Image (cartoon, helix red, strand yellow):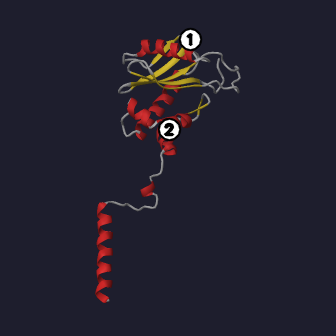
Amino acid sequence: MNLSLYSIQAFVILDSEGNRVLAKYYHPKANPQGETKEFQSLKDQKSFEKGLWSKTKKPGGDIILYDGHLAVYKHSLDVILYFIAGPTENELMISVALSSLTDAITMLLRNSLEKRGILENLDLVLLCLDETIDDGIIVDTDSAAIASRVTRPRPDNELGININEQTLMSAYLTVREKVQQRIGQL
């Protein structure tokens, strides 16, 4: 029986050819079972990812036991998102965490969870991941809360001022009118 909070061993995003888009492996030193020796080298990680992709490249499933690891995955347009956990972890909890992370990323990327959007907004994706998983511990499963903590404030709406072409034209006309009045007074 696993009574540890350290449930996630890795988060991986692979593209439609099985190439790594993003991967984050957790090796917590505070884990009661000790630091694992799995996935220490890049070669081990890449070989695990290639094998995992070959088993999950066709849509249809969402949970698989592969190479002694529980892999919960979700297909999107041209990427597959994975949470890798130990074989005794709660599949439902891992699945809920992956769904909430996916939903939060989808909200932030304006409903286009694809490779290009992930790479262009890598900072937001990593912040979402950090808000969901902290060193292998699931800390939040509310997608709206995750997305709200990650969003950047918009600089033009920060003070409630909306500047557009009509506003600029109106300001220009007002200044031109005032200048003409001043010239007329001289």
User: On the picture, is 113 further left or further right than 97?
Assistant: left
User: On the picture, is 78 further left or further right than 91?
Assistant: left
User: On the picture, is 75 further left or further right than 34?
Assistant: left
Q: Secondary structure at mark 2?
A: helix
Question: Tag 1: residue type?
Answer: Gly
In the picture, which quadrant includes the C terminus? bottom left
Using the image as rendered, state which of residue 68 and residue 23 is in the foreground.
Answer: 23
Image quarter of residue 28: top right
In the picture, which quadrant includes the N terminus? top right
Give the distance between the C-alpha atoms of the residues marked 1 and 2, in whole angstroms.
31 Å
Disc 1 or 2, which lies upstream in sequence? 1
- Figure check: 185 above or below 136: below
Which residue is denoted by mark 2 in the rendering? 123
**Image x and y of residue 171, in percent:** 33, 70
The answer, for residue 86, to whether it is visible in the render is yes
Question: Tag 2: residue type?
Answer: Asp
Say which residue appears at 63% left-offset and 26% top-offset.
6
**Image x and y of residue 18, in percent:** 42, 18
Which residue is denoted by mark 1 in the rendering? 68
Using the image as rendered, state which of residue 183 and residue 88 is in the foreground.
Answer: 183
The answer, for residue 113, to whether it is visible in the render is no
**Image x and y of residue 136, in percent:** 60, 27
Q: Pointers 1 and 2 in contact (CB under 8 A)?
A: no
Say which residue appears at 44% left-offset and 15% top-offset.
53
